[in-house]
Image: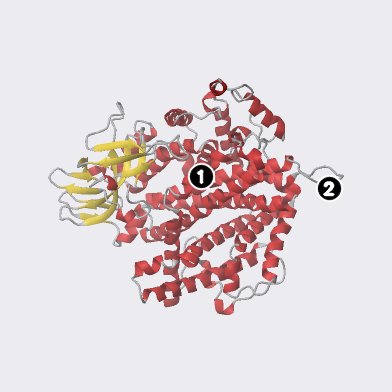
Amino acid sequence: MCNHQLESNEVLMEDEECLDFQMQIWKTMEDDPLFHHSFLTPSADDLQRLTTLRCKKIRSHKFLIVGDMLQNPIKLLVLTQSLCQYDMSLGLKYFVPFIFFINSVRDLGTEKHEHFIRSAEKEEINGCYALTEVAHGTNVKKMRTTATFDPKTQEFIIHSEDFESGKCWIGGLGKSATHATVFAQLITPDGVKHGLHAFVIPLRNPKTMLLYPGVLIGDMGEKIGLNGVDNGFAVFTKYRLPKDNLLDKMGTVTQDGKYISAFDNPRERFATSLSTLSLGRTGVSVMSTGILLKAVVIAIRYSAVRRQFGSSDGEELAIIEYQLQQWRLFPYLAASYAFKIFCDASISHLFEFRKGIYFEEDKEKMAVLGMEIHIIQSSAKGLTSWTTQHGIQECREACGGHGYLKCAGFGALRNDNDANCTYEGDNNVLCQQTSNWLLHLWAARNMSENKIITPLGSADFLYTHDIASRNELGEEVPCFVAPILEAYDILLIWLLENTSKVYEEHCKVKDSFTARSDSQVYFARTLSMVFIERFVIKTFWEFCNSEKSTGNEKAVLQKLCSLYGLWSLEKHLGTLYECGYATGPQPTRLIREGILQICLQLKPEAVALADAIAPPDFILNSVIGKSDGKLYQNIEGCLIQTPGATQRPVWWRDIIG
């Protein structure tokens, strides 16, 4: 039975409509034996079969239709996170064919492609999204799958020159996809390459699931995690595709083979055509956030019940009472709230952009908005997935030996989240897209009198502070966010100034590519992370001071935002001293005392704050994190029920004879 109670904090974080929607999804799953958990490990093939059956059942409930998404886009985030918090494989299995594939056709195609969308929605076809290749992942411009137009037959010839140019790691491709949105280099009859374009390519007969001639498909095999997803590879051999299967909103080919595009600037066309990647990267941030929420909830509930040590004659203390435990866990609790609020805002921004593209609003305006969303999500993916990676480990260790049990849940969370650091673009490489954009804005700022204004205001720090007129860090503990954001503004200006200088110095003796590459460590990469940390803090703080936040909840959220800001800022103390904004021992003491003070202030609220973002026990699926607080009874019940746990194993006879 779902034991999750509706609290005021929950309604604050998730409006009542979305919360009811989430609980409906989870209650439906809990009532269905198909979704019941087992701590036994099935084979990869059995797990893929089970995940596919569960996905079909979720689809049959029709939790979310297009009209719902347009009316309340946050519902897409809620559905994605609800499924991923149950099982990441199920979330991906649903997200890729029914959201990612359909949206790619809708965003990049035209009216003649609507039949693909209708067929996918009716489950007559099953789609996937094929961008990555064996030899190229994040460097999408160098993808080598080609689509050469043949005017005689009005067809594109899809071809992989070798195995290295084959598509790989494609979710759903291994066994279940019938169609794919495939990105290939479009080549006109005159031999000119026009860059990556998207094509809808039939792969398997939907009725027989047999491969069509001209394509070889295989499964990628067992992975560290996410084995419920059938990731696959595909190699094309002069596969002929009708001309109309080109998704041609961004560019098309005439019958006689001439290329036409609505974009004069190929870079703008390319950026807009890859807008679907922003949805994917936002999805990764959503999934990472959902995983972090679970890890934090488990660890804080465990810490509130687990008792160790105390005064010599007194009762043992709950380990949550210890400063060290608070310092280890509470910043990740604050990060969970920060990321949740940031992801909500990101989904809203993304849907505004997609609506603008779909209804063909101002192309130049949409290109600028699309680029800013792309830049934000490129660095946000790294921030959320890396923070979750570190957070899971800290939470696991904070739960001691019991945290190492499989039934505690941390192992699956850690293995599944690992992929978030890599797919949809390697985190470290994506950071370079953010830093390149920022450096471009910095150069434009210094060369033009016109003020640079970005649609989402992520670069408003460019004019907020100047290094020459900076103020040193004050004498009071910065427990609210204005001084934290000011420090971030100074950091960004200093990093922009010095990254630009380092790059220019390298350019004197190296080519621009090598110069850019050699400017990453301590400069460009740090710049990207400081940028996204600031934007997340800014988004969180704006939420704290919005109409959605009132009364006691507002005060607690402000403390969480301050804690996340100080905790993030402490990692950059070295740079704050280097740039001269911090001098002497006082700034370090103030920031660290601020972290400890807020942790202490949050201690009475910690369990309630964890409960407010916690899924039901059925979804949390952790023996040591259940909401009833019966830690040791739950561990006993799990161990006693484990098949053969209290019996001598059969193999023992073989050893003792």
Q: Which mark is residue 546?
A: none
Quick one: SS at disc 2?
loop
Q: Is residue 448 visible?
A: no
Question: Is 639 drawn above or below residue 255 in the view shown?
Answer: above
Q: Furthest residue to the bottom?
A: 468
Give the percent coordinates (x, y) of residue 401.
Answer: 65, 40
Residue drawn at x 44%, y 76% is 446
Q: Quadrant of the C terminus?
A: top right
Its colouring scheme is secondary structure
Labels 1 and 2: the sequence-earlier one = 2
Residue depicted at x 54% and y 35%: 86
Residue closer to the observer: 222 or 266: 222
Residue 607: x, y in percent? 71, 44
Image quarter (top left, top right, bottom left or bottom right) of the N terminus? top right
Question: From the viewer's perspective, is residue 206 above or below residue 538?
Answer: above
Name the residue beneath numbered marker 2. Answer: 311
Snapshot quadrant of residue 4: top right
Mark toward the viewer: 1 or 2? 2
Mark identifier at residue 417? 1
Q: Mark 2: give few (<14), some (14-19) or many (20+) Cα within 10 Å.
A: few
Q: Residue at x 50, y 66 (%)?
A: 522
Q: Is 616 in front, or is 624? A: 624
Image location of residue 492, percent across then percent down: 53, 68
Which residue is rendered at x = 72% and y = 68% of the image?
476
Q: Which amino acid does the dot numbered 2 rest on?
A: Ser
* Residue 129 in which image quadrant: top left
Amino acid type indicated by mark 1? Asn
In front: 16, or 447?
447
Q: Secondary structure at mark 1?
A: helix
